[in-house]
Image (cartoon, helix red, strand yellow):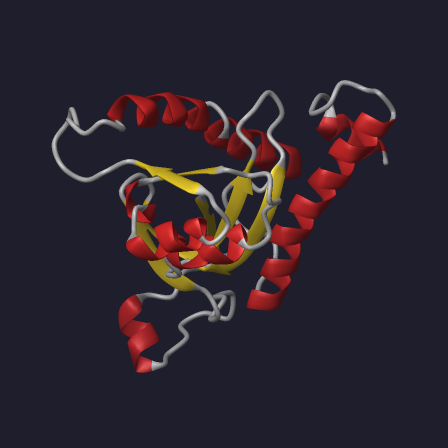
Amino acid sequence: MGTPLRAHGGVWPKKHRLAGEVPHRSIDTEATWSKSGYHGWWYGWKRHVAVVVGSVWIPLAAACTIASDADNLIAPKLLEQLPMLVRYVLGDTHDNTPELRAACALHNRALVATRRGPYPHRDGGGEGRRIFHKGRSLALEPFNGVFKNIFAWRGQMPVTSRKRCQLFAVGSILLYQIVLMYQHQRQQPVDVGIKALLRAA
């Protein structure tokens, strides 16, 4: 899943970017433009994360890139970090590519991704994909919402430059994982009260 992260400060208009002009010092010139069907145009970064679909949303792999980096190009790098026990990889329509299917096949994994074309799809895997994607929708968006709430991002990165944005975005994923492990080891309810726990630390 790729999540838009808006750059700190102002945006860099395309006409100024092409001319090499920076109209304001607050602009993070290392960020880029991108567009999605849901979020529209945004200027900034993108956080890519692979999350377990289950009762607890555990992030297994993450990366932070410029906004224009396509999800399906970053996904193979995330797959390399996943445990070998992972057998199914759930993705969107743009993930349904021969390259990503080949990357999954290297580790005996099946890519379950929606297909292009009018609904309902008449192939034999349609019903199975619907079941998988119901679970996916119940995991990714709630995880994203909880994550933004915990770290109070408010839709914009608090830092500038590629290196600092990557450290913040991926570092927050690591911190989240550490908190889940802490709760598990102490036999506390996992994924409950994380924001209060971080504030008290």
User: x, y percentage for residue 173?
Assistant: 65, 45
Question: Which residue occupies the foreground of this view, 15 or 185?
Answer: 185
Q: Is residue 10 above or below residue 192?
A: below
Judge left or right: residue 190 versus residue 38.
Answer: right
Judge left or right: residue 36 versus residue 196.
Answer: left
| Quadrant for the N terminus in the image | top left
The residue shown at (50%, 38%) is: 87
The residue shown at (46%, 56%) is: 76
In this view, the residue farthest toward the left is 118
User: x, y percentage for residue 7?
Assistant: 49, 56
| Quadrant for the C terminus in the image | top right
User: x, y percentage for residue 55?
Assistant: 60, 20
Q: Is residue 77 above or below residue 15?
A: above
Q: Quadrant of residue 163?
A: bottom right
**Residue 45 seen in this snapshot:** no
The residue shown at (46%, 54%) is: 106
